[in-house]
Image (cartoon, coloured by chain):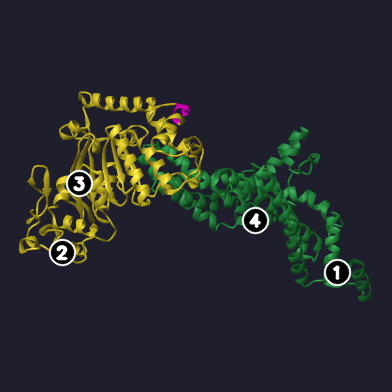
Chain colours: A yellow, B green
Amino acid sequence: MTEAMRGEAQSLVTRANIRQGNPASAGRASAASEGPAVIDVRDLEVAYYVYGAEPTRALRNVSVRLRPGEILGLVGESGAGKTTLARAIMRVVPRPGRIERGEIFFMGTDLGAMSEAELSKLRGRDLAMIVANPRGELNPLLRIGPQIATIAEVHLGVSRKRGLEMALDMLRAVAIPDPERRLRAYPHELSGGMAQRIVIAMALICGPRFVISDDATSGLDVTVQAQVLDLLRKLVREQNTSMLYITRDIGVAANFCDRVDIIYKGEIVEDAPTEAFFSGPAHPYSNFLFAAFSHNAELRRRWMGSAPSPESDAAEALCLYADRCVKRQVRCLAEHPALRELAAGRLARCHFPVER
Amino acid sequence: MAVVRYIAGRLAFLVPQIIGIVLVSFLLIKAVPGDPATLMLGPMATPQTIAELRAQLGLDKPLPVQFLIYVDKLAHGNLGTSWQTTKPVLDDLRVRFPATLELVTYGMLLALAIGIPLGVASALGKRGPLAKLGGFYGLVAGALPDFWLALILIYIFYSLLGWVASPIGRIDVTVTTPHMITGFYTIDSLLTGNWAAFRSSVHHLILPVLTLGLVNAGPILKMTQATMERTLEADFSLYGRLCGLPEKLVIRRAFRNALPSVITIVSVLYGFLIGGAVLIEIVFSWGGAGQYAVQGVLNSDFNPVLGFVIFSALFSLVVYLIVDLIYLAIDPRIRR
């Protein structure tokens, strides 16, 4: 990042803080420990309405809080509701989805009460999203430079020339070789890893307060993934941005995130600081995920349950994980467990959490 | 520079394409029953005079020889003569082809002016009134026979209201035709400052152009709508919204991405209408190329038919070349 870029990012941060009436942002460590929530999702329910069928509940009572500068890992299998949560926070739930209940606060403001015009001023500026399939996300007919620059022009009101300068700085920041030439390149001329970095550059050019990375690095080679993650962490730390890092790879979450949330069938089943989580997951599903990524066959066997059953109507009455759980007991089939605190900052939704 | 080489390559390829097209249409037209000599001489002719005329026309020679003779003449710019008009086909087509082209070009422009806005509107508002109009129009335009619509329009705007000139020909008989430059009466009259001819030719164009425009806006509307719906839902459009780009900009970019498909359908329609507008030409006694070719087919007058085929083939090939150049300009993915 150049001085100018840093200045821009810094001024954004300051401006956001003034809006909030906060003192200038303190060091990351202290900010992460107290500070108000950047994103506060409360009891969010999202359902998909398919014609001629009962609506599918994609998110059940999801509450998520992110403090300034915090990186929260959201881990779960396909269909658990990760992307739905991401899109719901951005207020672009894919059709035929509908937000049924719950609130989403950004820096204390209710996003649900905002107009579409107000939201689109926030999107890309304060709330950014990095998506997978980066080549599809870039317009094939436009050069990279203008595509990145437009976002700065729209949100920061800068000229095309200044926008292109900022784009060039961003390309340098995401470590794209030969950035001057890449500005003039078209998306099809880039490799997947390169295109992913472009999308990161687009998401971060306005110095957002909050970034969602939706499975953004999973399509990359392991080596490239490591590079991109390092880069992402560096940029996020520099701008004191909070980040929701969505992944299916629990190993990446371990290395990358400050805190981990495990989501299963649209429900948060565990929430813990990364270190505590990886020294001993409390929920049986977390243990299963953990085991699935380990090379210990014995460990895998121990936690491996049966295949998930389709949604049952009685879901209210029982634990959603009961059908797969190796620790299942009678109570699990009779009573839906609440997300309860096991220790300071550690939550699990289980009647019989694993203890160590 | 690469573009110049590309165009040169495409143009060089025109010659074999034309020869292939001529060969196929030559064989097809010879397969049609009917002897021009018999038709030319009428019912009173003796077999002997018919045989003489056949020899004179070269019809007694074997087919390959006839073909080679035709190609040889063609290479010297001679398309033969039409026995119906007794004029060289080239001279006939020089007047008639621009007549059709003028009609079809304005018709296409009107079709674009109707089809694209309605198509975009119906892609945008899935339930709005404009979308309903677009959907209804797409349905109706596909089902309207063009000659029928032409007759209805004549009835309303000429017979009932009397707003337009009589639906006969390209210009009033009392008005001197403009000196031929492009063959488009509207353009030539403007270039020569012949205002009477300009007014008259515009008046004569209104109804046939309206017919062509209304009928052909249908497919353009459908294509615009379908492609726009796709590009508006494409990942890059969704991501644009996620980045907070104004909806207007997202729509504009989606339209740009839809443009290649729209241009394709336009080029196909344009090439097709050179011959496909023949019913309109007949209804309005336009004296265009399509009418000329159909008369040729009906009367075993081979040279006009072949001449028409060559002209429209050349025209289509040029249109496709231009379209490819437009693709090249708007889509960087094929620029290599």
- Label 3 crowd (10 A; few <14 / some 14-19 / many >=20): many
Gap in Å between the C-alphas at discs 2 and 1? Answer: 88 Å
Could you tell which of marks 4 and 1 lies nearer the N-terminus?
1
Residue B61, placed above or below residue A228: below
**Residue at mark 2:** A302
Q: Is residue A302 visible?
A: yes
Identify the residue at horizontal 79%, vertical 52% (top origin). Answer: B93
Chain under numbered label 3: A
Quadrant of the rendered structure where residue A264 is?
Answer: bottom left
Q: In the image, which is nearer the foreground, mark 1 or mark 3? A: 3
Gap in Å between the C-alphas at discs 4 and 1? Answer: 31 Å
- Label 4 crowd (10 A; few <14 / some 14-19 / many >=20): some
- Residue at the limit of the structure toward the left, as seen here: A331
In front of the other: B307 or A293: A293
Q: In the image, which is nearer the foreground, mark 2 or mark 1? A: 2
Residue A340 covered by magenta stretch: no
Three-letter code, disc 1: Val
| The label number, if any, that marks residue A260 in the structure image | 3
**Residue at mark 1:** B65
Gap in Å between the C-alphas at discs 2 and 4? Answer: 70 Å
Secondary element at image label 1: helix
Gap in Å between the C-alphas at discs 1 and 3? Answer: 85 Å
Range of residues picked out in magenta? A159-163
Secondary element at image label 4: helix
| The label number, if any, that marks residue B272 in the structure image | 4
Three-letter code, disc 4: Phe
